[in-house]
Image (tube, rainbow, N blue to C red):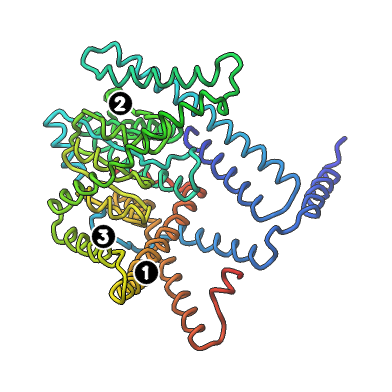
Amino acid sequence: MPDFGDLIGRLVGIIGEVLGASSLRLGIGPTLAIAGILLILLSLVARPISRWVTRDLGHLSAVPRSMALAAESGAIAAFSLGTAGIARSVSASARLRTLAALPILSHVARAAARSGVPMEISANDPIAAILAEATVLEAHRRTETEERAGRSRVVYVGEGRATAAGYALAARTHGGAGFVMGGLAEEGLLLLDGMASNTGSTSFGTADASQASSVLLEGEGALIGPELFQAPSDLTRGGHDRIAAFAGNRLAWITIVVLVLGSALVVFGRIDLATFLVGH
Amino acid sequence: MRRSLPTALLVIVGLLLLADFVIVNPSLAALAGVLLEYIVLLAAAAAITGGLALALRHIDQLRHADAERSGSVLVLLGMAAMLLAGFYPGSTGAADPLMRWLVAALLVPLVASLFAMLFFFLLSAARRGVRLRSRETTVMLLAASVVLVLLLPLGGSLGELLAAAAGWALAVPIGGVFRGLLIGVAIATAIAAARVLLAVDGAADD
């Protein structure tokens, strides 16, 4: 007959062996720092209290009106997920910019589904295209308009940043509303211009600092830098949607405190806080 | 169940990779390696599916009279040329001279031509910007003009003065704005990563 105590003992032994074979990759200090940051993030994400931003970021509050106008004129809504993609060989932060654009796509897709406006979503990355398709289907499911889902389409335009820009410039379809959200690079201006010249109202956003001027020049609504990540929190009334904004607010304050404290310590010649934090 | 399974997978995979980043453990490293290989395989499969979808869409467009057929024909011919160059008997794949010639003689000049249009599109964007929000765009264009003047290749004491002013402008006001943006983006990215890792869904009904 199996011995339950023996089983527990063996399990504890295995866990002990695994732990015994492990060592800390970064040493005790940096590991504790990473764990601390994770705990702070966890607490910030888990306990929202107040709202951070109340203004209309990226002119996104006008999306329902744009969709109504598009429905009247029989136009489509065009949405581009930028040029960074998710599975492309770009930096992790650029991939997160594409992921940050998906809640905005969800918001636009729900408005389009309610108004009966077909959407054309373009992406230069197959994984991003698959996620976009799932987002659009989910928007139709949430708005109970699944019968309209077939009119929208997700277009994989091919690999490369120039391909996305070329597709937008060559597009002949005139949309009622145009959106470009996600990561952009040097040719971002071409993508934005192509989208702006083919559509009625526009809203563009990117977290790439080098492309901030392109977005400001081309878009009626513009999301610059961190605003791309903040905007989804402002789009809905759901409390958990604002969590990023609350957490960002607190982290911003923590950063300001660290910067001021670090500068004061350097000025008074006591400790170089930046050297301590960065480690060199 | 439909939503909880992917969410659970996301959280488990994310935490495993994070743990592998912090802790040196052979078993954990092997598991993380397998997961990373799966991710690469998934991306490769998605790339093939994407290519097939692209070809099918353009084949479908050829059947419709109102569609832009010339563009579809060009896309399909381009895809066929690249596939032939990579798969003909005796081809060395991506390193094949024919493939390299196609990239160097066709693809690179095409992309370079697209980039060359940036200047003209910038002027068009400036006109559009002035129409959309005249005050802000005017300030932006004035600032750009000042920086352009500062960067003029002049000699003598005036040139030195302009170069010093350009250096100060790049290091202090422009550098400050960029650093502020980068800090904000870094914070927002960390929050977005935590939201993804903790599976905090952002799609509520509105």
Q: Secondary structure at mark 2?
A: helix
Q: Is residue A191 above or below residue B144?
A: above
Label 2 marks a residue whose chain is: A
The residue indicated by pointer 3 is A54
Q: Is residue A20 left or right of residue A199?
A: right
Q: Earlier in the sequence, mark 2 or mark 3?
A: 3
CA gap, disc 1 and disc 3: 26 Å
Q: Is residue B143 left or right of residue A38?
A: left
Find out whether the residues at labels 2 and 3 contact each other: C-beta distance under 8 Å.
no
Query: Mark 3 Cα within 10 Å, few/some/many (few <14, many 20+)?
Result: few
Q: Is residue A2 above or below residue A22?
A: above
Find out whether the residues at labels 1 and 3 contact each other: C-beta distance under 8 Å.
no
Q: Which mark is residue B176?
A: 1
- Is label 1 or label 3 in front? 1
Q: Quadrant of residue A55?
A: bottom left
x, y (%) of residue A115?
20, 33
Query: Mark 2 Cα within 10 Å, few/some/many (few <14, many 20+)?
Result: many
Work out whether residue B40 can be spotted.
Answer: yes
Q: Which mark is residue A149?
A: 2
Which amino acid type is shown beneath numbered disc 3? Thr
Q: Quadrant of residue A202?
A: top left
Quarter of the picture holding the C terminus of chain B: top left
